[in-house]
Image (cartoon, helix red, strand yellow):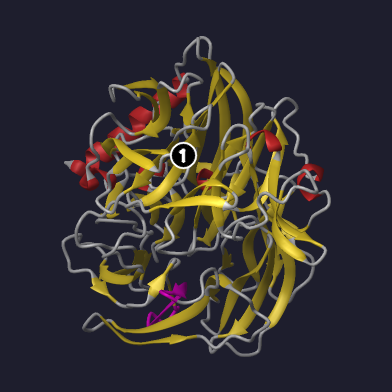
Amino acid sequence: MRYISVFCAFALALLQLAAGQTRAPADILVLDQPSNQWFEGPLTHVSLSPDGRWALFTLFGRDPRIIALKSGREQPELLNAGIEGLQSAAFCGQKGIARLGERGSETRWFLSDLENKQLSALPADAVFECSPDGSEIAYYRENSLGEGLLVGTMGNLKSFQLAGKITSMVFSADGSALYVLMFQPTGESSLVRIAPNTQASRTIATALDASPESASMGISADGRSLFLALVSSGAPSNAARHRPEADRWLKIYKIDLATGARQAVVESARQDNFGPEVIGDNLYWKRNLIFDSIVAVPVGGGEAKEIVTGGEVPMWSPDGKRIGYTFGGWRLADWALDLDAAVVGVDEKAQRNSAPAVIVSGYHEDFPPAWSPDGKWIAFHSHRSKTPVPEYSSAGSTDDIYLRLADDMQAPEIRLTDFGWETGPAYWSPDGQKLLFSSWVRGGEAGIDKLWVTTVDLEIGRALRTDMLPLPGTIRSASWAAWSPDGKEIAIEDNRGGGQRSLWIVHDDGSQAEKLLDYQETTYGGLDWTADGKAIIYSALARDGVQLFAVARSGGAPRQLTHDSGNLMHPRVSPDGRWIACTRLVQSKQIWRRPLS
C-alpha cells in the first residue's frame, strides 16, 4: 500500500542520514549556518560575493544579513554603514554591495561607492543581476506585470518579453550573454539565452525539472557550461510533486551549452542541493539540512523525548491516545505540495505504541487533523486542489478549512470556508460547536493574520457561519490562537513584526483584550493552555534557539521549560494535562565548494 511505502521510504532515508552523506573527496564545507526558524529556513536565499569572501542571506528579498565565509561571523556594519531603514541588499559584480534603504531624503538602491548613481533609477521592487564587471544589469519588477525583463546599461536598457516566472539569471564572464531560467505554469522550466547587444534571444533547453523558488545559477569562465539545480535530467511529473515519499530532491547539474547534454555533479539523499555559483576555479552551492520530529515534554518542563521522526505541528485526540501531525519534507522543487497528515498511537507516558498511518492525504498541502471533542470529526487546513498542480500558488488551489469524519479516509471532505490564504491550523471550542483559526484573506493585505470563528452543525456536517473576531487595533496580526479549557477566553500570539511578539488574552467574542507579555520569536511559534487553564505554554527565542515557556494566566514572569539543543515550537498540551507535544526542528543552510579542475 502507498501509505506503508511512504513510511518505509522515510525510515530508509533516516538510515542513510545516520550513515552520513557520501561526497566527492574534494568537496569542502565552507559554512554551516543554523536556523532557528520554521519553514522560513529552507526558503532563505543565499548569494555569494564575486570574490567568495561573503555570503548574503535574505528572506523573500528582505531582512539582509551578511556573513564572512572565513570566520562565519555576521558583519552588519557592511550593510548598515551610511544607510538607514535598510530593506534589502544584493551583490553587483565587482562594484560591491547594492543596498536598498534611506540616505537623507532619498530612498533607493545605493552602491558601496557613495557617489555611484548607477542603480539609483531601479525601482525598489527590482530583482536584478549584474554582469561580472558591473557595467551591465538585468532586472525585472517583482510586483509588476507587463514590463518584462530589462537588460543593458542604466540609461540604455532593452526590454525582453519572456513567458514564465523568472527564477534565476546569470551573465557570462564577458557580459556578452545573459542566461535566464523560467518556471512555466505547466510545471516545466525553460532556459533562455539573451544577447544584450543584439537583442537576440534563443531557447537553450525546455522541459527542465527545476524549482519554482528563486536561486542562483553558475557559468564556467569559458562560457561553455552552465550549472543549475534540477530534480532530474527529464521532465517533471506534477503528480509526483504531491507524494511525500517521492525522491524529488534537487541536485546540481552541469549543462553543456553547445549540445544541451546534462550531467548530475552534486547530489545527496533527502537533501536539496541548489544555488550553484562559479567563483574563480571553484563551484559553490548550497544545501538544506532539515531534521524534524514530534517530541513530548513534561508539562512542568524537562527533557524532550521523541515520539516520531519526520513530523511537525502535533494535535492530540480528545482521549489522549493518538497524536496527529504533518509530514512530507520541505522539498524546494515541490514546496509544501507534498505535505500530508499522519497519526500515531501513544500511551499514558507519551510513548508511541503504533506505526504511523496516514489520516489526511490529497493534492497540495495538508495540515494535521484537529479532532472534535467527541472524536467523530476532524477539521484541517488544506491547500486542496482537484488535480495535481505544479507549485504552491498555482491556479485552482484553495487554502481553507475542511471537515471530515475522523476514521474514514474515504468520507467526503467538506469545505467549510472559501476565502483563506496562508490559513493556520483549526482548533475546536471545548463545546465542539466552533472552530478557531487564523488566516489572511485571499486578495487582501498580505502578512496580516485575522482571527476567524466558524460555527459548525455537526449533525449534517456544514458551516453555519464564519465570523472574523473583532479584535482591537492594538493586536497587529493574530498568527496563532487557542481556546481556554472553559471556552471563555482565547490566547493569541500577536506578530508585531521584526521578530517581536506579544501574548494577548481576549474574551471569546474578541473583547476585553489583555496583554500578558512581550517576547521575541523567529517564526510561527504557537501556544496552548495548560489543562487547568492556569497558564499558557508558548514558544519563544532563548539565546540562539527557540524553546518552550510558561506564563501564568494572571501574568508575571515567564518560566523557561526546555533547554533543548533543537528548536521547540507548536506546543499542544495533552488532554490529561501531563505532556506537551511539540515540533522539534534542527536545520541549517550549508555552503559547499568543489574545485572545477
Q: Quadrant of residue 92?
A: top right
User: In the rendered image of this protein, does residue 274 appear above or below residue 465?
Assistant: above
Q: Is residue 353 magenta?
A: no
In front of the other: 213 or 119: 119
Q: Is residue 6 in view from this perspective?
A: yes
In front of the other: 539 or 328: 328
Q: Is residue 296 in view from this perspective?
A: no
User: In the rendered image of this protein, does residue 383 appear above or below residue 170?
Assistant: below
In front of the other: 292 or 200: 200
In front of the other: 146 or 522: 146
What x and y, as percent, mark residue 124? 61, 60
What x and y, as percent, mark residue 249? 37, 34
Type of residue at label 1?
A: Asn
Disc 1 element: loop
Residue drawn at x 63%, y 28% is 31
Q: Is residue 158 left or right of residue 155?
A: left
For label 1, the crowd category at 10 Å Cα-Cα, with few meaning under 14, some 14 to 19 and many 20 or more, is few
Q: Quadrant of residue 109?
A: bottom right
What x and y, as percent, mark residue 146? 40, 63
What x and y, as percent, mark residue 265? 40, 20
User: In the rendered image of this protein, does residue 405 appear above or below residue 584?
Assistant: below
Tell me the residue that label 1 is attached to: 197
Q: Is residue 434 magenta?
A: yes
Q: Is residue 431 left or right of residue 127?
A: left
Q: Is residue 123 left or right of residue 427?
A: right
The N terminus, quarter of image: top left
Residue drawn at x 69%, y 59% is 108
Looking at the image, how many numbered discs can be counted on the residues?
1
Q: Magenta part of the protein: which range? A: 429-443
